[in-house]
Amino acid sequence: MRILLTLTVWFGLLLASAASAQSLEDLARQLPEGSFNDRAEVVAKIGATGDDRAVGLLNALGEGELRVREADGAVIQVKGRGSKAVGYDPLTGDELGPVGSGSTESIRVNNSLRRAVRAAIGLLTLSSPDAGKRLAAANTAFAAPDPEQIEALDTAIAKEGDAAVRTAMEQARAAAVLASDAPGAEKVAAIGIVARRGGTDALTVLNPYRGDADAPVAEAADKAIAGIERAQQLWNVGQNVWFGLSLGSVLLLAAVGLAITFGVMGVINMAHGELIMIGAYTTYVTQQVIRTSFPGLFDWSLLIAAPLAFLVAGAIGVAIERFIVRFLYGRALETLLATWGVSLILQQLVRTFFGPSNREVGNPSWMSGAFPLGGLSITWNRFYIVIFAVAIFVGLLLLLKRTLFGLQMRAVTQNRPMASEMGIRTARVDALTFGLGAGIAGLAGVALSQIDNVSPNLGQSYIIDSFLVVVFGGAGNLWGTFAAAFTLGVANKFMEPFVGAVLAKILILVFIILFIQKRPRGLFPTRGRAVEG
Amino acid sequence: MSDEVRGLKGTQLYLNDVHRSFDGYKAINGLSMVITEGELRAVVGPNGAGKTTMLDIITGKTRPDQGRVIWAEHTDLTKLDEASTARLGIGRKFQKPTVFETHTVEDNLMLSLAGDRGVKASLLFRIAKAQKARIDELLELVRLTSARHRLAGSLSHGQKQWLEIGMLLAQEPKLLLVDEPAAGMTDAETMRTAELLRDIAGKRSVVVIEHDMDFVRALDCKVTVLHRGAVLAEGSLDHVSANQEVIEVYLGR
Amino acid sequence: MASTSFIDRRLGVFLALLAVVTVGVPLANTALSPESGLHVPTYMLSLIGKYLCYALLAVALDLVWGYCGILSLGHGAFFALGGYAMGMHLMRQIGSRGAYGNPVLPDFMVFLGYEKLPWFWHGFDMFWFACLMVLLAPGLLAFVFGWFAFRSRVTGVYLSIITQAMTYALLLAFFRNEMGFGGNNGLTDFKDVLGFSLSSDGTRVTLFVLSALALGGGLLVGRWITMTKFGKVLVGVRDAESRTRFLGYRVEQFKLFVFTVSAMMAGVAGALYVPQVGIINPGEFSPANSIEIVIWVALGGRGTLVGAALGALIVVAAKSWLTSAFPDAWLYALGLMFILVTIFLPQGVLGLIEKLGRGRREQPEPEAVEAEA
């Protein structure tokens, strides 16, 4: 039976040129006629037309949706049942109106005909002019290996010009060979080809041959599977590293503003998390305005929100410094308490104006979806957040090292009286420095609005983490913050698969607590001026 | 090395080739010095010569990278912390007067009195008659009897300096390390302080770090000049001030 | 020193008021008829009892922060541990009266499919053991934590941050069902203690009186500690830690002792709190709770013990009133309290009262502890 079918497909392929003489419409009309075998031949011819429309026709046939209209003997596709039945042209997909019950007769399909349909569809899609469709067809063939497709694949491989698609086809052919009763040596070779594909689907294909009766085949399968699993483990490590970097970038974003206010100025700003939250809400408001007034600009919304968030959070930061922190310099613990009060007020303000529930902040199109990198799938939003975090960090380094403001800031923090003597307006530098740290928190909020719930509690979830990052890295050292954020991020993600997310977090906390006991000044202590209460 | 130390009978403190650097900056660089029992010694040197770091190393606040600090011929101080060196009998006066500002003058002295420093002893502490008398004596010595019940925070700068010296003496130390005691004092106070330190010496060893040359002259003792973390010259004040190198260091090249 | 009596005016006034409340409130609850204008309903009595527990917690924090300068942002953890220890006993007391009727396993364990009691739940069926644990659990945590932290000289803000991290880690841990402490829901549905029903007025009055006595006792213990030479060393550590070291005191031992004592005191407060409110859950570990304790102390006046208790009573009473009268206003009020007290009222309410009372006399001394005539 199988041979017969193979032959019919083969025959159909041979007749490809001749068949094209017969129009698809003619062939379609022949579908209801004759024995199952005759009709299988017609299906093969349809497959050989290479006509795109044929895929829909054959699919409809395979699904049992093709019917003959009794009035004129036309072949139509009927969807729905009973009174809801609607007719369609199977080739164009045009709607033909409702179909009365009893006005059509079904075209019966049996298993062998279904197989012929599948083979023909495979052939059609494998020869589609669209490389993407050919690749998809090859992948489908790989996932459901069918020895009957070997010839169709051979033909397709011979014609294929695209290297990637050809590789996929060869892999699909190898999978089909494995499923066939080909000799052992050929199967061993096929295993090699399948194994090169790697990944879970290759494992699925190979797994049944582990205990193959043919010893060399079984051995080759074992080896190939072991190899794939090793590779997968490596990719898993890669995946964890990526997740860790992603978490690290979030920590870096949350902490880098604090590295300025706490690390450089020595001011404990417990409202730091709320400044992040303000940044997120600024993004929300910006998007609302864009949605209602300038819908076309939506993809730019984050780029518009970023400077706004910097300014809003920065302004609040300057206000906090001028009205509260200024009076408490040198009294770190009091500063901690007063800024905690600020954080409560900011939270409640946002709750009063925006309500306690989560606000929807959309992803622009360029931040949606994912792209593959080897065996990894990387989401665009995480990818851009990593880039954004590093960009902010580099920008901040340049600001501190290369600008006059940066120079004044370092001068004031290192030797205030001397800086004052030299004509630097220290009070202004203090306010601006604090504003800078706050503004960066606002920027972080723009990014975090893309991956976290925008609610009044947003900031609370970052404040402890960000302090620990700064302390772990060594207060006053930006590179320390950078290293600490990514170290903790990666460490956390590596532990997660073993102990779960919560326990991983607890272990990180305990580790940091112990670490601070050992090295109170952090990973990279700054010399001289210490931040102590 | 320790044989050599043992040879120095009557040595209170012996520093041998001590090194300490901070992030590559050599604060102490091969410093060696001997302080004998009951000796009064002035240590002078320009800013950054390593004077305060030297005191930090002796008292166990800072660990040297290399070298030995030997106490009373056999104890290595480099392994001990501040509390341990204090218990051995080293008292230290800071450059900036450091007293317990929210305690009374009397309580400051009470807390400094020699005795068991443990938690339990502190909880069960009852002041003895002899200790009261010692406090009276010290108050008299540092001229703070009338300020006895005042909070230390309300004292003048010079009074705080003296209170701190009084607290040091209450510890009954064998060695006093005194960092710039004359800073912020009037001339009369300075002279009286020098007199006080001269009186203390003899019974106890005293190392005074000072900038003020008049004060050093008033101390009338052996002078060690530190420069770049090592001893540049040692001897009487007249001897070291005639030293060409010392003049260069102090007056600039 | 000699001129300061053990029970000074400040402490005397407070203890007298406390005695009045301890006797008066239960009397007003039991002896007066409900129609009487002065009658105190039982819920009110338990509410005040809860406040007294908070006041004890504040005294515990003041002992370390006010006197030794250790700003713990994790004292809520010690309170919660004491509460859990008591809660575990009350859970075991439920016995077969639980919803699942298991004589040994508390309901939540049956629900989560526990086969047998976890090892750390053993012994809690005995009251004395639970009481011991009320002291030991927080005490041990404080001892271990403090041993590491003080030995390596973690001070100031750094210490505050790691105490906060400590309570945060415990919060996360206690939320986990696998920890065996009832996870998210915590421990609740308590029935009785030592055979007395927790819902009966008599038990509630007893718990109230015990809370008041514990607060009084806590104040006296605190007063004793701070009056000794030990207490003076603590203040020395707070104001000039290095001077204390150079005088030969092992600062870490002093800190460790007072930190542990304070944690135990907080544990007692938690243990008395739980039967009165009828529940203990991981929310008690939240860092925000611990920070709130700090504002009680700051508002009342740190370094005075009595001020801390007073501050706790003022703030939690204000909180109860505001959250029911103006629910949105509470966080604003609390936030403003933090800001205004730290900037304008460093001596707290008690400092203000005494300053006003002192009238035209000379400027108050910076340290209120020793400023008594």
Image: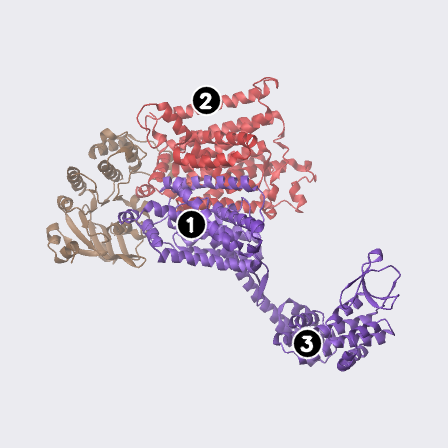
Chain colours: A purple, B brown, C red
Q: Nearer the viewer, mark 3 or mark 1?
A: 1
Q: Which quadrant is the C terminus of chain C positioned in? A: top left
Task: Give the crowd class for mark 2: few <14, some 14-19, many >=20 residues within 10 Å.
Answer: few
**Mark 1 — on which chain does it sit?**
A
Q: Which three-letter amino acid code belongs to the residue tagged 2?
A: Ala
Task: Give the crowd class for mark 3: few <14, some 14-19, many >=20 residues within 10 Å.
Answer: many
Q: Which three-letter amino acid code belongs to the residue tagged 3?
A: Ala
Pointer 3 or 1: first along the chain:
3
Q: Eyeballing the image, is A438 above or below A58?
A: above
Regarding residue C129, the answer to whether it shows in the image is: no
Nearer-the-camera pick, C286 or B128: C286
Q: Which mark is residue A437?
A: 1
Residue A482: image location, x then y, percent? 44, 57
**Mark 3 — on which chain does it sit?**
A
Q: Quadrant of residue A180?
A: bottom right
The residue indicated by pointer 2 is C16
Residue at 55% over, 55% down = A297
Q: Which three-letter amino acid code belongs to the residue tagged 1?
A: Gly
- Give the spatial CA distance, label 2 vs label 3: 93 Å
Q: Is residue C98 left or right of residue C171?
A: right
Q: Nearer the viewer, mark 1 or mark 2?
A: 1
Q: Quadrant of residue A226?
A: bottom right
Q: Quadrant of residue A339?
A: top left
Residue B64: image location, x then y, percent? 30, 55
The residue indicated by pointer 3 is A174
Q: Circles 1 and 2: CB distance less than 8 Å?
A: no
Nearer-the-camera pick, A137 or B245: A137
Residue A384: image location, x then y, percent? 52, 59
**Mark 2 — on which chain does it sit?**
C
